[in-house]
Amino acid sequence: MAERVDRDANQALRARFDEVYGQYRRLRSGVDDLRSELAALRITERSDDGQVTATVGAQGELISVELTGEVYHDRDHQALSRKITTTVHRACARAATATQELVAAHLPAGSGSVEFLRTGDFGALLGRADAVLRREDERHG
């Protein structure tokens, strides 16, 4: 009887391992695609008046700033500085959203990594591990 129970338990563990391993393989195969997509991601934003154009990458890194000749007609350097800063910030915000969407498409639903990208909450990265440890503590406590 004990041998049958062990065989059933082993079979269930093997099935669970196969499932988890399959998930890992699918995730791993998508990582290279994700890297390429993130490396190629460019977000371009224009100021409301069209005088400033800013392009950023997936991590919000500034790739280029272009100014039209009209910016020199108004000699208010502080206004120009604000316009450039605002345009870059808008591009960065769009890049963050686009990056989150790309990453979310490659990770399992409810992934702590996606939640971390969205909120910046480090607790989201450890949420699943914390839950497992709590269950283990409850079992042994």
Image (cartoon, rainbow, N blue to C red):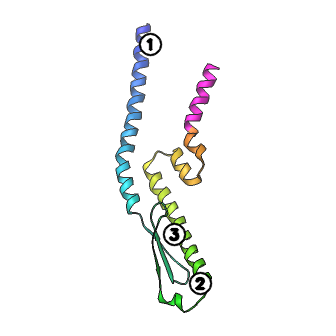
Residue behind mark 1: 5
Q: In the rendered structure, which disc, 3 or 2, sits on the residue that comes first in sequence?
A: 2
Q: In the rendered structure, which disc, 2 or 1, sits on the residue that comes first in sequence?
A: 1
Which secondary structure dominates the residues rendered in magenta? helix
Q: Residue at x 61, y 19 (%)?
A: 140
Which segment did they paint magenta? 128-141
In the displayed structure, 126 sits above or below 83; it is above
For the C terminus, the quadrant is top right
Neighbor class of circle 1 (other Cα within 10 Å; few <14, some 14-19, many 20+) is: few
Give the spatial CA distance, label 2 vs label 1.
78 Å
SS type, badge 1? helix
- Residue 60 location (% of width, % of height): 49, 63
Neighbor class of circle 3 (other Cα within 10 Å; few <14, some 14-19, many 20+) is: many
In the displayed structure, 71 sits above or below 6; it is below
Q: In the rendered structure, which disc, 1 or 3, sits on the residue that comes first in sequence?
A: 1
Q: Residue furthest bottom?
A: 73
Q: Residue furthest top?
A: 1
In the image, which disc is placed on residue 91? 3
> Looking at the image, how many numbered discs can be counted on the residues?
3
Residue behind mark 2: 77
97 part of magenta stretch: no
135 part of magenta stretch: yes
Q: Residue at x 53, y 89 (%)?
A: 72
Q: Residue at x 60, y 43 (%)?
A: 123
Q: Is residue 83 shown left or right of residue 104?
A: right
Q: Amino acid at mark 1?
A: Val
Q: Amino acid at mark 3?
A: Ala
In the image, which disc is placed on residue 51? none
